[in-house]
Image (cartoon, rainbow, N blue to C red):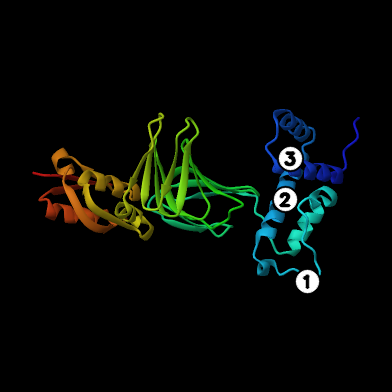
Amino acid sequence: MSEVQPAREIDDEAALWAVRSDARELEPKTAAELAAWLSGDPRRQGAYLRAQAALSLVDRARALPSDALRPEPAAPALPRRALLAWGIGGVAAAMGGAGVLLNLRTEAFTTGLGEIRRAPLADGTQMILNTDSALKVQFTARRRQVDVLRGEAWFDVAHDTQRPFIVRAGGTRFEAVGTAFSVRQRGERTDLQVTDGLVAASRSDSDQRAEVPAGHRLTIADGGQPFVVTPDPAAIRRSLAWRQGELVLDGETLAEAAAEFNRYNNLKIIVEDPELGGERLVGLFRTGDPESFVSSVTTLLDAEVRREGETLRLWRP
């Protein structure tokens, strides 16, 4: 029976690996050695993650303004490679005394039909989820990552140069540091709208990349089609009115407006007349009040409406 490796020894080895992998990109041989070490004991992966977290916290603490942590005057700055001699426990204790809290958990966020949810994240980022959305959020020592599994969300990202904020939707990756933007995942299409700062977009299945500044939109379709970046700050403001529970129309067709209302309500609008569906509209409406919208449409466009259960059918006689 093999001897069980002491936990402290695992921590010390993990600290060494964390420093080695942080200093440079590991060569294939060294990366293979790390993988073999991690697989040798189920405790090692957790120790390695803790070591990476502690190393990141040392870097972040040294980068903070002088009054952010308010150390004792006699306390010397913590050397970055103290991990090698001190181990994970000592670094974690030192950073705990500085009042730094690290969150290494995964959280799920969802909204139901018609629900709009505000969800502040642990790093100070403000997130708002639109109707019928599902997201997974995972923070580590190196990155902040959000997966948009379904629907749409807007992010006002807390600035942190040490940990980029990454949103993944479909096969696309969006990266920002301190930025505000929305991502919508719908079928084979992904939409990015940037309201502040700059977002870098890239595809996992191609070499396509784009930098999208504030006031610009990016539309991405699966299948390797080229990125389409367009400046349209007015359209972005209208599109994001859902954060206040509003739908702003400025030339959209009745069919497009009906589809938007159907995102938020069990009561669905069906436009039976294609010519009527092509009529363009201007107005401000509440996303949760399709009946008022239909009432306005029947008056404005001389249309008829018939309710059948949870359906409002529109046509022009």
Q: CA distance from mark 1 to mark 2?
A: 23 Å
The N terminus is located in which quarter?
top right
In terms of secondary structure, where does tag 2 sit? helix
Amino acid tagged 3: Gln
The image shows residue 256 at horizontal and vertical percentages of: 25, 45
- Is there a contact, CB below 8 Å, between mark 1 and mark 2? no
What is the number of the mark on residue 73? 1
Please state if 187 lies on the left or on the right of 285 as rendered: right
In terms of secondary structure, where does tag 3 sit? helix
The outermost residue toward the bottom is: 73
Crowd tier of the residue under label 1, counting other residues whose Cα lies within 10 Å: few below 14, some 14–19, many 20 or above: few
- In the rendered structure, which disc, 1 or 2, sits on the residue that comes first in sequence? 2
Quarter of the image holding residue 94?
bottom right
Amino acid tagged 1: Pro
- Judge whether 264 appears above or below 189 on screen: below
- Judge whether 276 appears above or below 126 on screen: above
Which residue is more in the foreground, 91 or 263?
91
Let me know if residue 309 appears in the view.
Answer: no
Mark 3 — residue?
45
Q: CA distance from mark 3 to mark 1?
A: 37 Å
- Residue at the location (47% across, 46% down)? 134
Mark 2 — residue?
55
Which residue is more in the foreground, 285 or 188?
188
